Image (cartoon, rainbow, N blue to C red):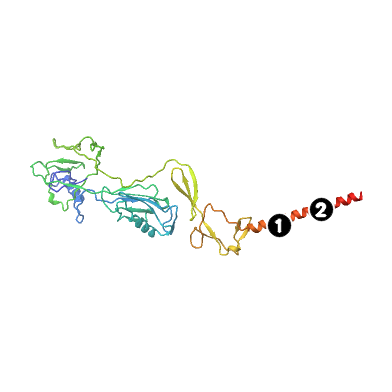
Amino acid sequence: MGTAYAASEIGERLFGLTVESGTPESENTVAVAEAISAVANRPAVRGQASMPAIVQGNQMGIDPSKPFEVTADNRSLTVIVDNISSQIELAVGQYSVGDFTKEVQGKINLMADKLGNQVSGVRVEFDTDSSSLIFTGSTATDDSFLQVAGSADFGLEDVEPAFGTNSSYIQLSPDTQGTTPLYVFQDRNGEWLETTDKGTFDENDIPNWSPIFLDRGELTFDTSGTLVSPTGASVLKSATIIGNDINVDYQGSTQFNSPFAVLNQSQNGAPEGDLVGVNIGEDGLVVASYSNGSQKSLGKIILANFATPKGLRQVGNSGFTATSQSGDAKLGEPGAAGFGTIRAGATERSNVDLTAELVALITAQRNFQANAKAIETSSTLTQTIIQMRG
């Protein structure tokens, strides 16, 4: 929480105060005050600046200076913006890094939940120094949240999510109760001390007063809204003045739960499962299915085509190799221009005419039977002639 004070207010201030004009303390104090406060063109700031959620990916696994491929294996991104989550599928193809960031940004800003709430204003940029992607949310509030998960090719594996921040400050009123103001000065040893005597120090001598702010703290509550941490009061003790301790007690702070509705749920893991089958799609993607309901892409089948398929030389019963007549193999994905699709589990149709082959088999069988009959008749005649001679 940022805390700002006016020049005449009670509070902690990093301005040195002169105790006696012309002393080393005076010169040191004025120098410190001018260094901290006398900034001619800088506007005063209060507290911590509001920032949207910013997620920076890891170094990309591919070379972003050259066109790269988005394939079926790395096209999926899981994105959560505030309370809206979605599984984004990028179009397969070749991208430059500029086209890629534009495509991802467009997909994210089309996300919407079941109630019609839509994401807008999310920016996706490429940082050339770190060779990584930077995602910036559209809102600068404590409730803003951004998380991106994807392939290591794009540096989006195991990326930490981010929350936005919202600035706040307290403007204290000037002292109207007649109490003693408290000043802070720096002695010749460089130590900061407190005093009620400001000496010859004049707040109007400082050209521009710059307020300061304290580091952000955290209050922890249980489910009933009762403060859990910190349990005690924080005490800011005075080094020189008795009775001016400042007690900051959080015991009166509470935070109660309120009704809510679950709009969507996501799971980043799966129970143990066994392989139950492998399927090959028409696009050649090989997908393994497991008993826990999850699926995983194992690879992709690539097809080869030739300028003159009849020029291929047969090797064995079902193999072919390229020749000078067929030309070199041209590789491509199933379904692309010039390539067919893949049909898994289908039986290849035979080029044999079963009817003609069956007729030929019957004819051969009859010829064999006729030849066998002729041999049998010849053997009988020979036996008869031999018996007649005997």
Amino acid marked by disc 2: Thr
Horizontally, is 138 left or right of 293 in the view? left
Is residue 77 visible in this depiction of the protein?
A: yes
State which quadrant residue 215 falls in: top left
Q: Is residue 243 above or below residue 364?
A: above
The local secondary structure at tag 2 comes to helix
Q: Return the residue found at the far left.
A: 178
Along the viewing direction, whichever of 216 and 348 lies nearer the viewer: 348
Farthest residue to the right: give it: 390
Say which label, 2 or 1, has the lower sequence index: 1
Q: Residue at x 78, y 53 (%)?
A: 373
- Report the front residue among 7 and 120: 120
Q: Can residue 238 be seen at all in this image of the molecule?
A: no
**Residue 267 place in picture, x, y as percent:** 37, 44
Query: Residue beneath label 1, please?
Result: 363
Q: At numbered mark 1, what does the secondary structure look like: helix, strand or loop?
A: helix
Q: Amino acid at mark 1?
A: Thr
Gap in angstroms between the C-alphas marked 2 and 1 = 21 Å
The residue carrying mark 2 is: 377
Q: Is residue 336 left or right of residue 243?
A: right
